[in-house]
Every structure is written in structure tokens, then in C-alpha cells.
Amino acid sequence: MKAVILAAGEGKRLRPITSSIPKPMIPLMGKPLLEHTILGLKNAGIDQFLLIVGYKQEIIKEYFEKSSHQSKVKIDYIIQEDYLGTAHATGYAKDFIKDDEFLMMYGDLFADPDIFNVILNKYRETNYEGLITLLKVDNPQDYGVVSLNSKGLVKNIIEKPTPKQNAGNLANAGIYIFNPSIFKAIERTQKSIRNEYEFTDSMDILINELNGKIIGCTVNNYFWNDIGLPWQLFDTNHFLLDRLKKKINGTIEENVRIEGDVYIGKGTIVRSGSYIQGPCYIGENNNIGPNAFIRPYTSIENNCHIGMSELKNSLIFSNTAIPHFNYVGDSIICEDVNLGAGTKLSNLRFDNGNISMKINEKIIDSGRRKLGAIFGPNSQTGINASIMCGKKIGQNSVIGAHTLVNEDVPPNTLYYQNSNGKLIKRNNPF
């Protein structure tokens, strides 16, 4: 069996994280999101992959041309020139699949690798044309909802149903297995009202016009995360860190305390006076301390400097400096960021209410009581800057010294308070 992974999208709702990398390449514990998926599928017996790429596709290709040899998988690529929907993207795979069966999924999903064995076994037990993974959800109006008949076969799929439609609560989890007959259905698929070729329409054609059968497989007992919003990265990070095994490959100076499961990569130095609480991942060639306090569920990639500062439940991408008297909690700090001395990131409201974040010009309730900031790549702060909870700092932006940030800062912006306390925003000249 082969695997097809759709990895062409821009991930606009995740900006500024995806301003410099495609969503499937977001790093988690030393590997891109997409590599975690590929390795999970490899362990399930799949070693031939087709990646449908588009946005910043050169980053995906460059990375996997190096890593695929080590993981002993074969990866082919097709560039999706036009974004005309999921059926259109899947149709690119026809020549790659030929007469084989294949697993197809979206590259921005993260799923417990055990799911792959479960659905492969269920598919092989049947003689049906396809399988779709399903999740029981409390908010079916936000998903494509699938209705099953008494035999567990798909009857119909309704995209974001209204309560009056009484469509049930089984949501499409975005992982499928099909034989080549799905391509006949894709060829018959017409554009939807969104002017796209929808994969759900193709499945409907397979069932109702081509007499195909698709079995449903619920996976609620396993971790699954559709990483469409920044704070959902924390959930996947927690899943991975909860399975981390303690391993120290770096150098630990005297008077360092390490508790719980902590991974420390090669070339990393943890200096005297530092205190690390697991689960925690620290990659390669990092300079930690002296007197750093790193609390649980923090993941630090490579070549970072974490000085006399406190970090908690945060993702720190490579080549970032958090060196002097900083606090970073429940935040995502992208690559090549520098926090000036005394910079603090707020992560809690006075009223303990949920923290909201602006996503594509809409205010979205994160459902989280604690949520800090998102720093885009190559951004920096001056001394004693303060960032309020739920704010985003765009890529290539600079926050001036002693500045309080209580709004999102656009990319390529110099944002500071002048001597009269007035906020100034202008194009970053640096």
C-alpha cells in the first residue's frame, strides 16, 4: 500500500508561524509535523509516499531529500499549481497509485500512530472500495458529518450541518483508504458552490453513482488533532512529550537539577544553577543557563540560548535567544527571534476568563485560560517590553524598549512608545 499526503496549503490561520515555513514543516520535538506522520505510517508498513506540495514546497523537498534516506522511505512529489479543492489535489495521485490501494490524509493533521494500524487492519478485513476515519464530536456544525447505515457503511456526508438537519455527530477525521475506483469518482466531480472540487462530493459519487462502499471507522480512543489554530500545537506537543523517554546527550554542569523525563540533545550545555522539569525536550547545540528555569511541556529546538529566564509550556523554534530575565509562558516563539532583557509575555487575564486571539480578522475564543503570545520569525524586542496575552507579533517586526503591546503587530513593523507615551507603528527600517 502507498500513501498520499496533501501538503500544499498555506496555513493562513497559523500565521505568523507559517510566514516562513509551510504548515506541515512546523517543528515538534526535533522533527517537522509531516515527518512524525511519515514515520508513523512507515511503522505501519507503508514506505512509498506521494506528497502533493505547493506553498513553499522547496522547504519540504529539501528537508525530505536528506531525511528520507535515513528513514528508508521513498518520497515522490507533485506540485499543485492551482488550489481547486481536495478532490483536485487527490486527483494528482492517479498515476502514482496506478492499480494499488492507498492511504490518503491531510498533511496538517497529527494522529496517534496507532490509528494507522487500526484502520489498515479494518480495511483489509473488508472488501469495500474505501474507508473513512470518524470522530464523535460535540460541535458537528463545524465539521463534515458522516451518516452510517446499520452495517457501518457511509450513507451521506453533510458539510457543516445545521441542527435541523439532524445529521448526527460523526465528523470526518481526514484519514482515508481507497482503491483506485475513487479516481473515477474524482473525474466525475463538479465544482461546488465554493468553486472547488470537493473530496466529499467524490465520495458521494463513488457511493451513489459507482455503487462503491465506504466503511466508517471511529477513532475516538486515540489522539487526533487538526492543527488549524496556533494553540492546537500545544495539544500535539503535550501528546509527544507525554511519551518522551529521558535521555541526556549533552553536557550537564554541576549544580543542575533535572526532574522527570527530559531529553537533551548533542552539543547542548546546561549550565550551573539551572532547573529543568520534565516532560521537556531540548534539542541540539543549545546554551541553557546559567540559572535557567524550564518548566514542564516546554520544547526547545536547536541552536537556542536560554539564559537566566523562565519558560513554561512553550514551543521555542531554532536559532532563538531568550537570554536575560525573560518570562515566556504558553507561547510559541518562531525561529531567529531575540527577546531583549526583561521582556515578559503575559498568559493570564485578571478575570481568569478564556483568552481570545484574532485569526484572519475574526476574534476566536481559544477555550484556554492560559495563552501567551505568538512571535513570528526574525522578530525581536527591546529591553523591558511587555506583551499581553493572546497577541501576535508579525515576522520581521521590532518591539521597542519599555513598550506595552496590547494588539497584534503586523509583519515588518517597528512598534514602540515615544517619550510622550504615544504608540508609533511604522515600517521596520532594519
Image (tube, grey):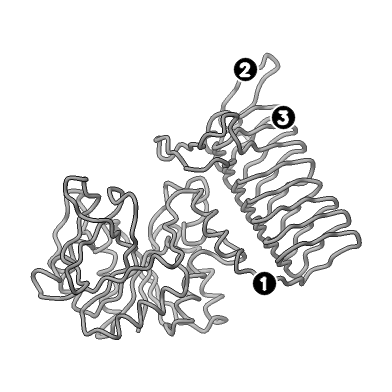
Identified at 60% across, 69% down, the residue is 243
Name the side, left or right, on which 304 lies relative to 350. Answer: right
Q: Position of residue 208 (x, y in %)?
A: 10, 68
Q: Position of residue 249 (x, y in %)?
A: 77, 72
Identified at 79% across, 62% down, the residue is 258
Seen as rendered, the residue at the extreme top is 420
Looking at the picture, which amino acid does disc 3 mark? Answer: Ala
Quick one: 353 or 194, which is closer to the camera? 353
Residue carrying label 2: 422
Quadrant (top left/top right/bottom left/bottom right) for the N terminus: bottom left
Please, what secondary structure does the residue beneath circle 2 have? loop
Residue carrying label 3: 401
Neighbour class for label 3 at 10 Å: few (<14), some, many (≥20)? many
Looking at the picture, which amino acid does disc 2 mark? Answer: Lys
Q: In the picture shown, does residue 422 fall above or below 228?
A: above
Give the mark nearer the N terminus: 3 vs 1.
1
* CB atoms of marks 2 and 3 within 8 Å: no
Q: Position of residue 84 (x, y in %)?
A: 25, 57
Residue at mark 1 to residue at mark 2: CA–CA distance: 50 Å
